Image (cartoon, helix red, strand yellow):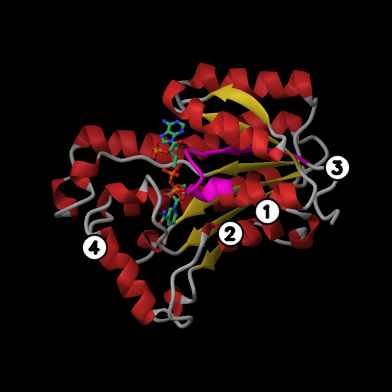
Amino acid sequence: NGLMAGKRGLIMGVANNRSIAWGIAKSCAKHGAELALTYQGEALKKRVDPLAAELGAHVAGHCDVTEEDTIAAVFEGLRQKWGRLDFLVHAIAFSDKEELDGRYIDTSRENFRRTMDISAYSLTTIARHAEPLMSTGGSILTLTYYGAEKVMPHYNVMGVAKAALEASVRYLAVDMGANGIRVNALSAGPIKTLAASGIGDFRYILKWNEYNAPLKRTVTIDEVGDAGLYFLSDLSRGVTGEVHHVDSGYHVVG
Ligand code: 0WD
């Protein structure tokens, strides 16, 4: 299938084979995309290297979004290797897990700053680095959660960061739209990943979704991946600034 044939994309946020970014990478590769993956730190490199090999993807190097020079290095590498970029996936978030439990009101200034930096601001700086490589248009996709819209137990400061991320998607969509670059977000239902394991009582949230979502089940990374395929391909060429829920319909009842 050639839906993504001839398209080159960077996927940021693969930590292991349970990562949502991995689900999106698999869907894009299956439909003919050529991929590059970044990893955060040497520990994750060991996991990302074999996954990249599985898809014939290029390993674009270490990237910690709190270190601007590591971002610049990744994009400079891609400029030299490919000369252009058609799509970009941002599947990155972080907060101190001590504060993904209990009351939002207890969020410290330091963790608020760090959570906003890694989980929200990083999309903006990455989009700015990608822009010159997307001179003939492109598609940028980030990952958000319903905790941006409604109060979800224990999601706390991450919900505030996701609200900022979703607002950033709209502002970036305007900034980049004239150049044919689209910016959208997938709002995924809860999935058991490394990042999710830091959220207090996550198993309860999964069960709650299973009982209450219209489809009466949770979603998989493959389902989020296929929704990602729509946003990263030309099928969604008329769509930008959108937050699209892939959550078994939970947001219509929750
Ligand atoms: O239920 C879920 N799992 C949902 C996740 C529901 C809805 C949205 N999301 C979002 C997350 O908030 C995140 O934005 O999806 C995105 C991907 O998260 P994931 O797939 O659930 O989690 P994971 O596989 O852990 O990938 C997130 C990765 C990090 O992994 P760890 O667990 O090592 O923190 O984000 C990366 C890292 O690879 N990351 C960073 N990358 C560069 N620089 C940084 C950083 N400073 N911090 C975290």
Which mark is nearer the camera, 4 or 1? Answer: 1
Q: Position of residue 53 (x, y in %)?
A: 66, 33
Please tell me whether residue 10 belongs to the stretch shown in magenta. yes
Cβ of disc 4 within 8 Å of ligand 1? no
Q: Tag 2, which secondary structure?
A: helix
The residues bearing labels 4 and 1 have C-alpha atoms spaced at a distance of 31 Å
Residue indicated by mark 4? 153
> Dot 1 surroundings within 10 Å: few (below 14), some, or many (20 or more)?
many
Q: Residues within 10 Å of mark 2 (few under 14, many from 20)?
A: some
The amino acid on which the numbered mark 4 sits, given as a three-letter code, is Pro
Residue matched to label 2:
222
Residue found at x 36% / y 73%: 209
Determine which quarter of the picture holds residue 115.
top left
What SS does tag 4 mark? loop
Span colored in magenta: 8-22
Callout 3 amino acid: Gly
